[in-house]
Amino acid sequence: MPIPQFLLQKNKKPKIFFVGVGMETLQVMFIALAVIAFNQNVVHANFYKSTVFTWGAHHSSISSNGNDLQLVLDRVSGSGIQSKKQFMFGSIEMLIKLVPGNSAGTVTAYYLSSTGSMHDEIDYEFLGNVSGQPYILHTNIYTRGNGSKEQQFYLWFDPTADFHNYTIHWNPSQIVWFIDGLPIRVFPNYESMGIPYPNKQAMRVYSSIWNADNWATRGGLVKIDWSGAPFTAGFRRFRARACKWNGPISIVQCALTSTTNWWSSPTYSKLSYSEMGQMKWVRDNYMIYDYCKDAQRFNGQLPQECFIQSFQ
Ligand SMILES: *[C@@H]1O[C@H](CO)[C@@H](O)[C@H](O)[C@H]1NC(C)=O
Ligand SMILES: *[C@@H]1O[C@H](CO)[C@@H](O)[C@H](O)[C@H]1NC(C)=O
Ligand SMILES: *[C@@H]1O[C@H](CO)[C@@H](O)[C@H](O)[C@H]1NC(C)=O
């Protein structure tokens, strides 16, 4: 039996309890602290170590020992990174601070994707706006090359004022988009009903910024004001607590419910009652587009998943 090579244990902090403090205990404490300190150093995937620039490296930068990434868009080009590793299920976090001021026409993206014409993809895309007007968070999911499952939101905070935590929680049972711990969207696995679910193809993590002024802001009416360039989006503390892809064997190995694969444990197989309440609050108050309500687009025939309560 090969030992499954499950991944990125880096974030696991040892839990240590101290009982009494003798000389030996102090020694143990010292060692324990050293271990903690060491682990702290490798807690977060480092942009230097874990990602590569795919585009626009010349004007982008990594700082704070690899903790921070600045992606830049100017007249010459946008920019982007991708993770070196591929994953199959996990909890993938990124703190993001969006382009401030007049960001109309820009799109900043953070997503997981496999490759090829039948690819899977899980998206966060932030559509910029003129100063003082709200960004739109555009979400989508592609399964076997098919997207068309867009949901859009305004945000309940100014995403340019500070870093916020955008996490994709992907396991065999469901995909959850989280913002600062609040679930905003869920895509449950209803493969048994013939609805494709991403669980066969490994995905990489991507971030990028580009010119999308042909569609992003008010449907393309507002163009980029290049006098405000360069446009910079900040990314911080990228952390992929996820199962590393080791080839097709990972389809089975990464789907196992082991302690290593904590993101697949029963607790994460569906939203809790309070998480459902949080998601309802977000969707009742901030959702501005839902493909599941757009009957016209689907010629009156809404997709099958739209009739399942937990997709709502
Ligand atoms: C980001 O959110 C995820 C999902 O709620 C959570 O597990 C994680 O601890 C958060 N990370 C930070 C840095 O707050
Ligand atoms: C930009 O602001 C306008 C006016 O408030 C709004 O209609 C639109 O949804 C906002 N966001 C984008 C990305 O267009
Ligand atoms: C693609 O997904 C949409 C949304 O679920 C669905 O309406 C459509 O039938 C799918 N297309 C194909 C070719 O599966």
Image (cartoon, rainbow, N blue to C red):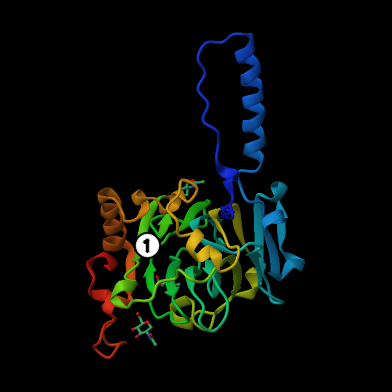
Quadrant location, the C terminus: bottom left
Is residue 11 in view from this perspective?
yes
The answer to whether residue 72 is above or below residue 44 is below
Relative side of 197 to 74, left or right: left
| Quarter of the image where one finds residue 5 | bottom right
| Quarter of the image where one finds residue 2 | bottom right
Figure disc tally: 1
Residue positioned most to the right = 58
Relative side of 18 to 180, left or right: right
Mark 1 sits near ligand 1, with its Cβ under 8 Å away: no
Q: Residue at x 37, y 52 (%)?
A: 268
Quadrant location, the N terminus: bottom right
**Residue designated by label 1:** 174
The answer to whether residue 5 is above or below residue 206 is above
What amino acid does circle 1 point to?
Gln
Residue positioned most to the bottom = 299
Residue positioned most to the top = 22
Q: Using a 10 Å C-alpha cutoff, classify the residue at mark 1 as few (fewer than 14 neighbours), some (14 to 19) or many (20 or more).
A: many
Quadrant position of ligand 2: bottom left
Is residue 109 in view from this perspective?
no
Q: Nearer the viewer, residue 266 or 61?
A: 266
Q: Position of residue 195 (x, y in %)?
A: 34, 76
Q: Position of residue 15 (x, y in %)?
A: 51, 30
Q: Nearer the viewer, residue 287 or 86?
A: 86
Q: Residue at x 25, y 87 (%)?
A: 301
Q: Residue at x 66, y 63 (%)?
A: 84
Q: Position of residue 154 (x, y in %)?
A: 38, 64
The answer to whether residue 99 is above or below residue 35 is below
The answer to whether residue 25 is above or below residue 119 is above
Q: Nearer the viewer, residue 276 or 209?
A: 276
Relative side of 248 to 75, left or right: left
